Amino acid sequence: MAINSDVLEVKSMTARLLDGKRVAAEIRDEVGNEVRAFVQSGGPTPCLTAVLVGEDPASQVYVRNKAKACEKAGIDGRTMRLPADTTQIQLVEVVRGLNADPAVHGILVQLPLPAGGNGGQGFNERAILDTVDPNKDVDAFSPVNVGLLMQGRPRFLPCTPHGIVQLLHREKISVAGKHVVVVGRSDIVGKPMAMMLAQRDGSCGREVANATVTIAHSRTANLAEVCRSADILIAAVGVPEMIGGDMVADGAVVIDVGINRVEDGAGGYKLVGDVNFAEAMDKASAITPVPGGVGPLTIAMLLHNTLLAAKQS
Ligand SMILES: Nc1nc(=O)c2c([nH]1)NC[C@@H]1CN(c3ccc(C(=O)N[C@@H](CCC(=O)O)C(=O)O)cc3)C=[N+]21
Ligand SMILES: [Mg+2]
C-alpha cells in the first residue's frame, strides 16, 4: 500500500537546528572588521577586563573563552584573577581602579561570585555590580543601563538577550504579533529579554519587536499549558531539561538558554539545556542546541559591546 501522508497524518516533525555557533562566528567576524577599521581610523584598541574571583571551573572556562574571542577580534581581553578570600572592600576597590583606568573600556565581573567569599560572609553582589561605571558596563547589569533599556533607549544591550535577538533576526524568525513565552525572570536574561521583544520599534536590536510576551516562572500556574501557547518559547530557568516535549506546541520555535553541567555517567560531565532536546525536537519547527546555541552568541555580543564602549569613550 502506498503511504499517503495526508491520510497517515504524520505528527512528528524534525526541527530546524538554529546554529548559534555559526551565527556567533559571523558576528565575531563583523565585530573584528569593525575593530580593525576603528583602530585604523585612530581609535584606541578596545579593551575588555574580566574580573574573576576564585576558581569555579565553569567560570574559568567562560573567562578563557572570552579572552580567546577577544584576541581573535583584535580586542585587548584581560583577566584579573583574584583569590577566593578577596574581601568585599578589596573587590570594590578593584572595580573602582578599572573605572578610573582610561585604557579599559569594558568591565565584566564574572558571576557567580564564590559563595564563601568575603571572609565567609559572602559578597554583596549587587553592591559590586553597582560600582561598575555604566559607561563600561558591557553586561548592562547596572541600574542606569537597565533603566535606559526599559525606556527603549539602551546604551548597551544585555549580551544573552541581544544574542537571541540577533539569532532570530538572522534566521528570519519574526516575532511581531507572536506570542513569546519567556520562562525565567532573572535580571540577566528573563526580564530584559521580555522587555526587548515587547518594545515598539527596533531600539533593542534590529526589527525584532512587537511581540506579545508572557513571563512565566516557578510559581506560574499551569506552566505546561502556558508554554504550549507559545509561538516562541524561550527557556531560561537553569533547571536541566525541565521543558519537556509536552510543553512545546507543534511548530513552535524553541530557544534554550540553559547551560547546565550534569554528570555524564562516565565520571565526567556534559552540558544540557533547560529543554529536553530530543523531545522538543519532534515538536518544534526550530530549536537551539546546547552547547552550540545561545552560549556562543553571548560572547559575540560581549565583543560587540566592548567595541561600542571604546567608541563611546
Ligand atoms: N558577568 C557575567 N556576564 C556573563 O555574561 C556571564 C556571567 N557573568 N557568568 C556566567 C554566565 C554564563 N555565560 C556564558 C557564556 C558563554 C557560554 C558558552 O560559550 N557556552 C558554550 C559551551 C561552553 C562550555 O563548554 O562550557 C556553548 O553553549 O556552546 C556559556 C555561558 C556568561 N555568563
Ligand atoms: Mg530539544
Image: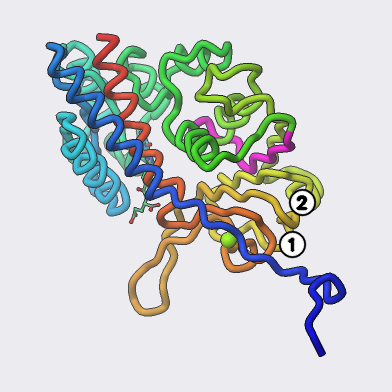
* Cβ atoms at labels 1 and 2 below 8 Å apart: yes
In the structure shown, which secondary structural element does the residue marked by tag 1 occupy? helix
Give the residues drawn in magenta, as a range: 178-188
Q: Name which quarter of the figure residue 155 lies in.
A: top left
Residue 38 vs residue 198: left or right?
Answer: left
Residue type, label 1? Asp
Residue at the extreme front of the image, as rendered: 2
In the image, taking residue 43 as reference, residue 116 lies left or right, namely right
Residue 185 is one of the magenta-drawn residues? yes
> Quick one: label 2, few (<14), some, or many (20+) residues within 10 Å?
some
| Residue at 15% across, 13% down | 41
Q: Position of residue 108 (x, y in %)?
A: 30, 29
Work out whether 176 lies above or below 199.
below
Task: Provide the residue designation for mark 2.
Answer: 228
Q: Residues within 10 Å of mark 1 (few under 14, many from 20)?
A: some
Please name the residue shown 41% across and 54% down the image: 292
Q: Is residue 121 visible?
A: no
Residue 268 in picture, x, y percent from top left:
33, 72
231 shown above or below 70: below
Q: Quadrant of ligand 2?
A: bottom right
Residue that numbered label 1 is attached to: 246
